[in-house]
Image (spheres, rainbow, N blue to C red):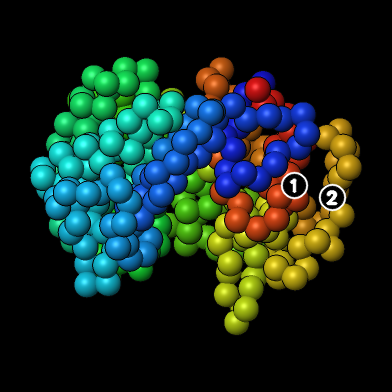
């Protein structure tokens, strides 16, 4: 049995019988500081687009205000950045929320040459955060794609996953991975509607060597939007694996109960992915689940229903 802990995402409802006890809180450099009655997963700066550093927790922290020419933040830039980012994180929390998870994101390769250099910088952050919150979990998300103009993320591919887990073990770190599957697929050149079982099999085969370090999974849909471009964080697994247009998603017949199974020709790759995902995570560890779906709540529910139909359990 694969067991997942659901995280609430943007107040979107899960199916009625699933009530998350953790919610994601945006904690980037332009976020408004918030209060929550639930345990929280802090989603810190992820450097997709430009920031103005309007978050109150950024006040007087000049070390984190380094950006490219477009204003996109440079993460893990140097020791000053790490000290200020640590202070930013502690100030953002400051007894207003209960942090269970802090999700961080990797630097770019134009100034941070490799994962070893990142780990050297990161260790200070882990030590300081865990001296205040010893039970907190720090997770790093694999990233692919940004408006950043000078380089690419250093933590995107399976080879990067393997290298990072090796460094975590060598340095005896508590850091673990929030594995975003759509971003991992994109980093390996797989896009909406363009999958094969052989490609998926090869990806999953290599993930077994790092699975003990995977503490959370991210799933979300894609669909084909305007100008025939893929719209990320939209739609369902059906629209992602089949390559449907955003306007056609709701024409899919969705099962009304968790025990009903949808069988169709296009469903085969999706079901293969879910089966491989289940086998990968079926190691007795409980992991977090974050559905980063920015479209309708029904689309989030469709992804959750797919997981339950495949044997996953939510607690």
User: Where does label 1 land, which residue?
Assistant: 302
Q: Indicate whether 217 appears above or below 232.
A: above
- Quick one: 288 or 181, which is closer to the camera? 288
Name the quadrant of the C terminus.
top right
Q: Position of residue 224 (x, y in %)?
A: 64, 70
Residue drawn at x 80%, y 61% as measured from the top left: 250
Asked if one can make out residue 169 in the rendered structure from this viewpoint, the answer is no
Q: Residue furthest bottom?
A: 227
Q: How many marks?
A: 2
* Res. 27 mark: none
Q: Secondary structure at mark 1?
A: helix
Q: How far apart, in angstroms, are the residues tagged by discs 1 and 2?
A: 7 Å
* Comes first in the chain, label 1 or label 2: 2
Q: Quadrant of residue 18?
A: top right
Q: Which residue is mark 2?
A: 254
In the displayed structure, does residue 23 sit left or right of residue 50? Answer: right
> In the structure shown, which secondary structural element does the residue marked by tag 2 occupy?
loop
* Residue 100 versus residue 150 in the image, above or below: above
Q: Is residue 53 visible?
A: yes
Classify 204 as above or below 278.
below
**Horizontal arrangement in the rendering, residue 126 relative to residue 6 (left or right):** left
Q: Pick the residue in front: 158 or 121.
A: 121
Residue 253 at what x, y percent from top left?
Answer: 87, 54
Task: Identify the residue at horizontal 31%, vertical 57% (top origin).
Answer: 54
Taking the image as shown, residue 143 lies to the left or right of residue 78, namely right
Q: Position of residue 101 (x, y in %)?
A: 42, 30
What residue appears at the point 73 percent right and 44 percent down from the top-left corner?
Answer: 301
């Amino acid at each position: 049995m694969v067991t997942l802990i659901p995280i609430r995402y943007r107040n979107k409802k899960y199916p009625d019988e699933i009530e998350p006890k953790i919610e994601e809180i945006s904690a980037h450099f332009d976020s408004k500081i918030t209060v929550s009655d639930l345990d929280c997963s802090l989603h810190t700066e992820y450097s997709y687009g430009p920031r103005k550093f309007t978050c109150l927790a950024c006040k007087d922290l000049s070390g984190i205000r380094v950006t490219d020419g477009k204003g996109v933040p440079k993460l893990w830039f140097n020791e000053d950045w790490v000290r200020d980012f640590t202070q930013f994180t502690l100030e953002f929390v400051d007894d207003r929320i209960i942090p269970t998870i802090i999700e961080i994101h990797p630097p770019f390769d134009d100034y941070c040459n490799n994962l070893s250099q990142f780990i050297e910088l990161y260790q200070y952050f882990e030590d300081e955060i865990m001296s205040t919150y010893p039970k907190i979990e720090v997770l790093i998300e694999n990233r692919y794609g940004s408006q950043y103009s000078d380089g690419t993320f250093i933590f995107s591919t399976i080879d990067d996953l393997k290298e990072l887990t090796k460094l975590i073990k060598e340095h005896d770190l508590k850091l673990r991975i929030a594995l975003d599957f759509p971003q991992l697929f994109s980093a390996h050149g797989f896009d909406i509607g363009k999958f094969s079982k052989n490609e998926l099999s090869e990806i999953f085969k290599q993930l077994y060597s790092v699975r003990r370090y995977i503490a959370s999974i991210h799933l979300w849909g894609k669909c084909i939007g305007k100008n025939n471009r893929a719209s990320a964080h939209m739609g369902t697994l059906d629209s992602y694996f089949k390559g449907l247009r955003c306007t056609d998603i709701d024409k899919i017949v969705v099962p009304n109960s968790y025990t009903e199974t949808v069988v169709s020709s296009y469903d085969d790759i999706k079901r293969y992915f879910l089966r491989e995902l289940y086998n990968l995570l079926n190691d007795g560890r409980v992991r977090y689940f974050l559905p980063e779906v920015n479209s309708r709540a029904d689309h989030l529910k469709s992804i959750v229903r797919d997981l339950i139909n495949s044997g996953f359990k939510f607690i």
